Image (cartoon, coloured by chain):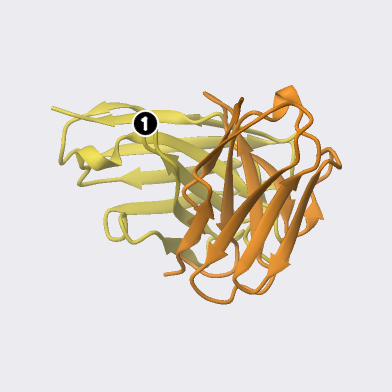
């Protein structure tokens, strides 16, 4: 079965950096695009970033563009999110998620999430 | 960016009720719309994709409809396990965007 396990969350000061990882299993990782989606406490879902199966194209939400970088290592079945210049409004649970669409960008599997808290 | 507007933001219903949630896109997204269910403290779960296709394993009481800019999610007979928050998502263009959510509560 598909498993996505995030790690790397924690408390960081404003302006700091953090790298999230997501270990994938139960499917052929190198064949699928992957997403990061976040959810601030008590708020709705916000899409953060997407990377194609081979890493050839990356897309970002407006609020993180220029500060966050999505990447992947297909040899390790691992997805990453490098976050820099962090702001208090980046505080959220960050979900790693698998793209399900051959024809669209639906998300068919989600990890359990990792909490990032940006606070002094 | 495509804005997704859900209504209502919350609804109180009883077990056995029929519930319909609407989602409106700010521009034509054809049928590239997905619906998710999220329970407190849990990750979202895909229910419907391509506006009306039921994800494998999802009960048939869930159905989706619409195209273009107006979409619906219907639960034909609400069950106790259906009390949750529901989100729509346009799956057509980057940046991907979600609706604000609809909380289905017990009356």
Residue B65 located left or right of residue B87: right
Location of residue A51 in the rendering, given as x and y in whole percent from the top left corner: 52, 58
Given the current orientation, which residue lies at the most extreme right position? B60
**Quadrant housing the C terminus of chain B:** top right
- The chain letter of the orange chain reads B
Identify the residue at horizontal 30%, vertical 37% (top origin): A18
Identify the residue at horizontal 73%, vertical 51% (top origin): B48
User: B79 and A43: which one is in front?
Assistant: B79
Identify the residue at horizontal 72%, vertical 56% (top origin): B49
- Can residue A107 be seen here? The reply is no
- Can residue A27 be seen here? The reply is yes
- At mark 1, the secondary structure is loop
User: A69 and B50: which one is in front?
Assistant: B50
Residue A102 located left or right of residue A89: right
Quarter occupied by residue B65: bottom right
**Quadrant housing the N terminus of chain B:** bottom left
Quarter occupied by residue B39: top right
Looking at the image, how many numbered discs can be counted on the residues? 1
Q: Is residue B82 above or below residue A53?
A: above
In the rendered structure, the residue with mark 1 lies on which chain? Answer: A
Q: Is residue A34 above or below residue A24?
A: below
Identify the residue at horizontal 45%, vertical 64% (top origin): B3
Location of residue A29 in the rendering, given as x and y in whole percent from the top left corner: 67, 47
Quarter occupied by residue A110: top right
What residue is shown with label 1? A41
User: B8 and B60: which one is in front?
Assistant: B8
Location of residue A12 in the rendering, given as x and y in whole percent from the top left corner: 23, 30
- The chain letter of the yellow chain reads A
Mark 1 burial class by Cα count in 10 Å: few <14, some 14-19, many 20+? few
Q: Is residue B66 above or below residue B54?
A: below
Location of residue A87 in the rendering, given as x and y in whole percent from the top left corner: 20, 42
């Amino acid at each position: 079965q598909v498993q996505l396990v995030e790690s790397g969350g924690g408390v960081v000061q404003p302006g700091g950096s953090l790298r999230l990882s997501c270990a994938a299993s139960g499917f052929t990782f190198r064949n699928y695009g992957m997403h990061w989606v976040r959810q601030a406490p008590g708020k709705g879902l916000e899409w953060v970033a997407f990377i194609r199966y081979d890493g050839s194209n990356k897309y970002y939400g407006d609020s993180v563009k220029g500060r966050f970088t999505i990447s992947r290592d297909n040899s390790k079945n691992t997805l990453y999110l490098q976050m820099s210049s962090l702001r208090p409004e980046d505080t959220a649970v960050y979900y790693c998620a698998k793209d399900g669409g051959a024809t669209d960008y639906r998300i068919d599997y989600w990890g359990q999430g990792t909490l990032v808290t940006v606070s002094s | 960016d495509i804005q997704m507007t859900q209504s209502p933001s919350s609804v109180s219903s009883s077990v056995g009720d029929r519930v319909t949630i609407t989602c409106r896109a700010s521009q034509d997204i054809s049928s590239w719309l997905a619906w998710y269910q999220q329970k407190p403290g849990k990750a979202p779960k895909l229910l419907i994709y391509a506006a009306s296709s039921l994800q494998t394993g999802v009960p048939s009481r869930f159905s989706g409809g619409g195209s273009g800019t107006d979409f619906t999610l219907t639960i034909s007979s609400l069950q106790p396990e259906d009390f949750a928050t529901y989100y729509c998502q346009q799956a057509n263009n980057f940046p991907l965007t979600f609706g604000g959510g609809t909380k289905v509560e017990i009356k």
